[in-house]
Image: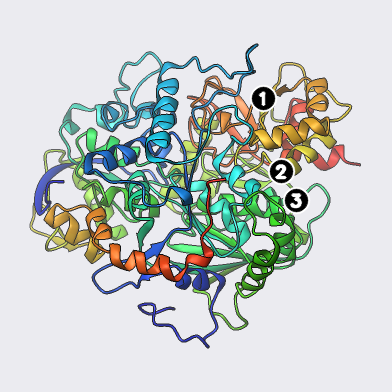
Amino acid sequence: MTTNGHFNRNRARTLFEKVWDQHLVRPQTPDTPAVLYIDLHLVHEVTSPQAFALLRERGLKVRRPDKTLGTMDHSTPTTPRNALGIIPVTDQMAAAQLDVMRKNCADFGIPLYDLGTSNQGIVHVIGPEQGLTQPGMTIVCGDSHTSTHGAFGALAFGIGTSEVAHVLATQCLLQNQPKTMAIRVDGRLQPGVTAKDIILAIIAKIGVGGGTGYVFEYMGEAIRSLNMEGRMTICNMSIEGGARAGLVAPDDTTFEYVAGRPYAPRGADWERAVAAWRQLPSDDGAVFDNEVTLNADDLVPMITYGTNPGMGMPITGRVPDPDHLSDVSQKMALDKALKYMALQPGQPLLGQRIDVVFVGSCTNSRISDLREAARLIKGRKVAEGVRMLVVPGSQQVKAQAEAEGLHEIFKAAGAEWREAGCSMCIAMNGDQLQPGQYAVSTSNRNFEGRQGKGGRTFLASPLTAVAAAVSGVITDPRELMN
Amino acid sequence: MEPIRVFSGRLAPLPINDIDTDQIIPARFLKVTDKEGLGAACFSDWRYEADGSPKPDFVLNQPVYQGASILIGGHNFGCGSSREHAPWALLGAGFRAVISTYFADIFRNNALKNGLLPVVVDAEMHQQLISLAQEDPSAEVTIDLEAQSVTLPDGRQVTFPIDPFSRYCLLNGVDQLGFLLSLNDQIEAYEAQHAARVLTTSA
């Protein structure tokens, strides 16, 4: 552990400790938290208005608009553009919130990727896409899935609106140093098993509170074998295990992904940056406060059955029985979840009828997710009575998918091809489940009502989502891959 | 912010584990641009039927728990989304403290910045407080921030942890932004030292 920031440079440190130490403006003291410098602040329309209001009230400026980027994603419609190429916002409250965002960014000099413009998209898709997300950085946003950016070896985490104001005004955050947990995933994934299945298995193992107070570092052969978008899927859901941040050490896969993107360093700057990034991985002998291990060889596609992301199981499994739990509060929680989901203890989920399939969200809306989904759905049809939405994570992802003809594959199958945004993951833009409907969703939360009041969510990978869409029931995607 | 020292209040028991912030304030209420009116939507989906009428069996709708200012939640209270609307909604619904065995990180941070006290007690005391609230809804407990204690009507007392900086800010009614602003020189020095790493979002 770093004590008050006075670390011994020869001591073996973790990736997290290195990034933390490099960003200390002021070390933690017995009376005050550490003051951490923030390299990139991403801002969206839902969690920022009250922060800007506080700045106005105090007569404060945004300290570093050049380290701040705004986008619109949560309350934005994903419905088609009109004849003028504009995405109409019919919800008056959403329209007002988007107007406030425009005014705030204009007044405070913050660049904004406005609705429908070529770079707009989900905040955790656009940062990496633009090359703004780089190894060794500190990145925050008023959104708990900011952990996504940890895939690059950045320390990235969600903050509340008061903290959004802190960062806008001072580019700094007050933080007590978290503990570290190594999550090692050895072995190799079998066909049909993906990064989403790894993270659902991890959360099922540790529970939704298992990582509270920790920063995760994901390591091991199975993590190293993933592409950047798979690593982002895993880091994205760190918060669903209770950890504010989850990191993967940067390597050649990382550098190749960042290289050439609009904000990536170039020329000699690039060489210097990569040399510095190569120093970031945890040293041999670095000590973690806790460790969890999994073997990817044993993993099968995962799916959730309950009302938090920790209530997950292999797709071939059976819904657990509350009567088999000894802990009273856990039994009550499972009882309540199964009642909400209208599922029976001991029943399999394979064959369970579904109404809606959602492919999208900051967890699984990147081009590789869409390619995987398209490959499996090509030549098949969405089952009668099932609605399938495919929502690209950004306008750039949408354009790339269209250049590859993926949209035609989805549309031919009978799926809806949408504009970019958070959409049915958070269901505040009109894309939502009806009460009682079942959805297989590639998003990150299956909380009660998360995808619409009374809606019931099964979280799974894009492959499992497609398998359900074309079958009309929950189906093991491996059956369609032979 | 008003300073917080000692306050007494009645308890409302909601002993459910892993209460996420989507339950505390569903996303459809997040289209506001201020903090007003969120109290009415607090626990909306648990509190109201589809037609808007109150569900009579939900704790916050029961007449005996009207006016309770201390919520007892289950383990891992406030998990999920980082929305600060969750503590705003709880404050708007009249709560000044939440007692649990465990709080999710971001919720705890957000609560402390708004004067909503997250009070951690052990499992045994948690159960005793739930029983007290269920058996005698009129019972009042006293929370003393300075002493970091919860006192039951029979005089039993337990202490709770809170980081010294949050405690100082709450006791004195000052917000944390003022402290950060006072460090301007150190922030400038840091920026000068790390100029080479500057990355700009302006094209």
Q: Earlier in the sequence, mark 1 or mark 2?
A: 2
Q: In the image, B7: left or right of B38?
A: left
Q: Report how many numbered discs are placed on residues in the image.
A: 3
State left or right for residue A203 relative to residue B8: right
Tell me which residue sits at (34%, 55%) in the image.
A170
Secondary structure under badge 2?
Answer: loop
Q: Nearer the viewer, mark 1 or mark 2?
A: 1
| Mark 2, residue position | A315
Q: Position of residue B96 (x, y in %)?
A: 19, 44
Q: Output the chain of dot 1.
A: A
* Tag of residue A300: 3
Q: Which residue is mark 1?
A: A418
Tell me the amino acid under the disc marked 1. Answer: Arg
Q: Are marks 2 and 3 in contact (CB under 8 Å)?
A: yes
**Residue A261 at what x, y percent from top left?**
68, 50
Q: Earlier in the sequence, mark 3 or mark 1?
A: 3
Corner quadrant of residue B44: top left
Give me the disc on residue A295.
none
Residue A58 lies, with reference to residue A268, above or below; the image says above
Tag 2: amino acid:
Ile
**Are there few (<14), some (14-19), or many (20+) residues within 10 Å of tag 2?**
many
Amino acid marked by disc 3: Val
| Percent of width and height locating residue A376 | 83, 35
